Image (tube, grey):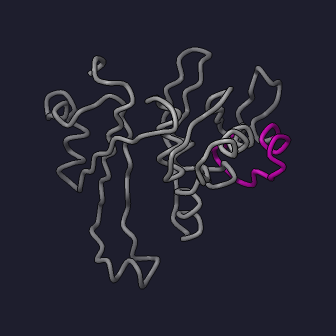
Amino acid sequence: MSKKILGLLVLMLVLLGPVAASQAQSTPSSHGKVYMVVVNSLAISDLNMADTPCLTSLIKKGTVGMASNRTLRGNNRDDGSLTIGAGNLARDYVNGILAFNSDENIVSRNQVASHLYENLTGVKPGKSASLMVNLPEIITGMQEEKVNTIPGSLGEALRKNNLKVCVLGNGDVNEMYFRTSVAIGMDANGRVP
């Protein structure tokens, strides 16, 4: 799998508890669950019971969808996640994606993430679990591009429709933070509930 083209994103949307389209539109309480599993550099041929039993089990219980997305730049995790979350071409800039748990101490900034977030964005974090603290940098960069991209559009639409969002996991290696899932689930203010 490691030799696959970097940037290929496989999205497996597993729907548990099928819901008729008419029911989903008429009553918010009738929504089922959607799990989005994002795996870089994974092809459908890599999925099999021997090598990926948990993913194979999820596929058998629901539905699977695959996608490869184009970004404003080359293929990389940060740009791919921002593009999925925005629903339009996107990219990161100087600092990449800086996302943290709200109560996490950011050693390099000598601040708790919620304080840094509020200082940089001017938005109160509320009870958010995760925050993208450098969203203003990304928004400023996007304004220079010839696109009408709004980072966090997916999470914003989910929030406005009272749907719960949760992001799990990271790709942190030692002191290097890789928390691109926040860019997929965050709202337009960079917050994940």
Q: Is residue 134 left or right of residue 163?
A: right
Q: Is residue 82 left or right of residue 36?
A: right
Residue lying furthest front in this view? Answer: 146
Q: Is-magenta flag for residue 123?
A: yes
Q: What is the count of numbered marks?
A: 0
Tell me where residue 137 sits by quadrant: top right
Tell me where residue 161 sits by quadrant: bottom right
Q: Residue at x 69, y 39 (%)?
A: 141
Q: Is-magenta flag for residue 103?
A: no
Q: Residue at x 58, y 64 (%)?
A: 159
Magenta stretch, residue numbers: 115-132
Q: Percent position (x, y) of residue 114?
A: 77, 41
Q: Percent position (x, y) of residue 190?
A: 66, 48
Q: Nearer the viewer, residue 67 or 142?
A: 142
Which quadrant is the N terminus positioned in? top left
Tell me where residue 9 sits by quadrant: top left
